[in-house]
Image (tube, grey):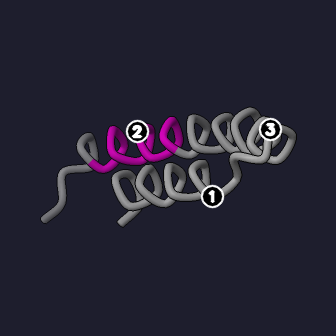
Amino acid sequence: MKNPQLAAIRSALDGVARLVFEDHMDSCIVDAVETGDAEAKIAEIKTAFARYFI
């Protein structure tokens, strides 16, 4: 049986991870497009995505 407290903690952590990821997208991707560094930032986002969501 799952522990409801652990499930709640995990859900909260997942929510924080999503917020951090969205903030990263909002700031870094815009900057990357403006500076022409999109390829490096896309690789960075893929790494972050793999770390937190896979």
Dot 3: few (<14), some (14–19), or many (≥20) neighbours within 10 Å?
few
Vertical order, 15 against 38 (above or below): above
- Mark 1 touches mark 2? (CB < 8 Å): no
Predominant SS along the magenta part: helix
Image check: 4 left or right of 13? left
In depth, the one of 1 and 31 nearer the eye is 31
Label 3 is placed on what type of residue? Thr
Q: In this view, which residue lies farthest toward the left?
A: 1
For the residues labelled 1 and 3, the Cα–Cα distance comes to 11 Å
Residue 32 falls left or right of residue 46: right
- Residue 53 pos. (x, y %): 41, 60
**1 vs 34, nearest the viewer:** 34
Above or below, 3 relative to 5: below
> Measured from the top left, where is residue 16 in percent x and y?
51, 35
Which residue corresponds to mark 1?
Answer: 39
Q: Which residues are magenta?
A: 7-17
Residue drawn where x is 18% and y is 51% of the image: 3
Q: CA distance from mark 1 to mark 2?
A: 28 Å
The residue identified by callout 2 is 13
- Is tag 3's residue or tag 2's residue first in the polypeptide sequence? 2
Instruction: Look at discs 1 and 2 and give the one toward the viewer.
Output: 1
Disc ID at residue 35: 3
Please say whether residue 8 is one of the residues in the magenta stretch: yes
| 38 relative to 40 in the view: left or right | right
Q: Secondary structure at mark 1?
A: helix
Q: Which of the marked residues, 1 or 2, is nearer the chain's N terminus?
A: 2
Q: Nearer the viewer, mark 3 or mark 2?
A: 3
